[in-house]
Amino acid sequence: MDTCSHEGLTSIEEACARAAAYASPLQGHEELPIVAAVGRTLALTVRSVLPLPPFDQSAMDGYAVAAGDGLVSGISLKVAGRMAAGDEERPLPPGSALRILTGAKIPRGVDAVVMQENVIRDGNRIVLTRMVRPGDNIRRRGEDVTPGEVLLQPGERIDARHVALLAAQGQTFVPVRRKVRIGVVSTGSELRAQGESLPEASLFDSNRPMIMALALQAGADVVDAGIIRDDPRLIAQTLRDLASRCDLILTTGGVSVGDEDHSLAALIEAGGRGEALKIALKPGKPAVVGTIGASIYLGLPGNPVAALVSWLLLGHAVMAALEGRSPKPSSGMHLPLAHVFERRLGRTEFAPARILSTGSGLAVEILGRGGSARLKPLAMADGLVRIEPLHAPVREGDMVLFHPFRDGFSV
């Protein structure tokens, strides 16, 4: 894939790679109870110690039999007993069957389980209604997991599926990387914190609370570093302070080329190094990435939709690198757009959208008509649509990639 895009802009993939290149996996890990580890990143390889299943077991409710070379339909067998999951093994008398329930241990001499739907029961006897072959409806010991095999690799983000697998192995604790610690700052002389008075020409800061919420959703510890005026010396002082206690410093605002855009200059004044990116992305074209001390620095745009999209791309790439895992591949679903959307060629565009149910099935509607400062469409949206650089205009019925917010704000 090309690393540069329209008008000399950097592609999204290259921008994410350049941001992630500044980060290295965090050192050290802790042991957590398996349920408490949900959302955390595995630090060490986990191998199995037990076979799963731990013994041959019935896969169905039915009747345990000795099939030998096969039992034909019409054979009648006496029911000699019953076994449920957890019961002690009982012998199978010759020429008979045992009532057996799902999960019960297969007794010695049994080589098949007949589904209860495939017999006719009359008192203490059953009549087979179809052929039974050896191995039918038996889960063999170790067919799912064998002892010593790798179950989970470092870098895996633990979820309920992994908890189930670990629990089945009898594991109570799991080694996970420590949480990424993120310092979040908003820059802008016009910004005020919630609870403060709001002078004319001022705005309440929405970026910092939003980014902190996104960082918490991503499993990070968050440091609220407040709002800093558009003063490169004050911003540099804040960056130096956060560098001593954070793995990632994230600012919003001041990343473009205006008179009050000081992010890169402040980073350098603070003793850091970095670069300004011009990304083939709408919204979110400008960004700054770099390091200060052992901390990663990520400067995002000031408009809230642009800040959110930039976090979903650059922020997730840096988080993955710090946690020693591969970035999550792009997910989403292709759905038709319910209307025409006029746009220019050259940049990948993300826009808030909601799902509609139409006579032809599901479709998506883009909310608002552009504008990276608009919060209402974002709050009303079910997710974001991604429109590729050369897809313009987008006609009614054209397929676009839709990323639902329920998938964890992942694009």
Image: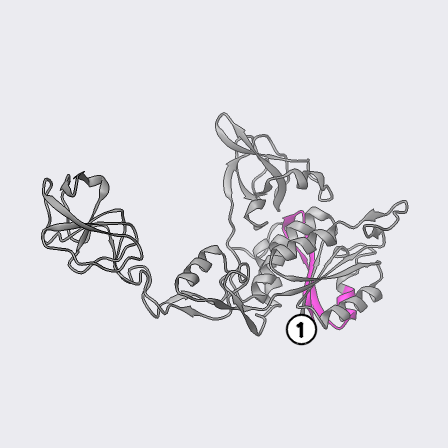
Disc count in the image?
1
Q: Is residue 252 visible?
A: yes
Which of the 4 image quadrants contains residue 255?
bottom right
The one of 6 and 15 positioned closer to us in this rendering: 15
In the picture of the structure, the residue carrying the numbered disc 1 is 294
Q: Tell me: 402 left or right of 267.
A: left
Q: Which residue appears farthest toward the right when viewing the image?
A: 199
**Residue 10, percent from left and from top:** 62, 55
The three-letter amino acid code for the residue at tag 1 is Ala
Position of 320 relative to 347 (above/below): below
Q: Residues within 10 Å of mark 1 (few under 14, many from 20)?
A: some
350 falls in the magenta region: no
The one of 152 and 97 positioned closer to us in this rendering: 97
**Residue 408, percent from left and from top:** 57, 50
* Image: magenta residue range: 265-292
The one of 259 and 249 positioned closer to us in this rendering: 249
Which of the 4 image quadrants contains residue 252?
bottom right
Q: Is residue 10 visible?
A: no
Position of 157 relative to 375 (above/below): below
**Residue 19, percent from left and from top:** 62, 62
Q: Which residue appears farthest toward the top when viewing the image?
A: 359
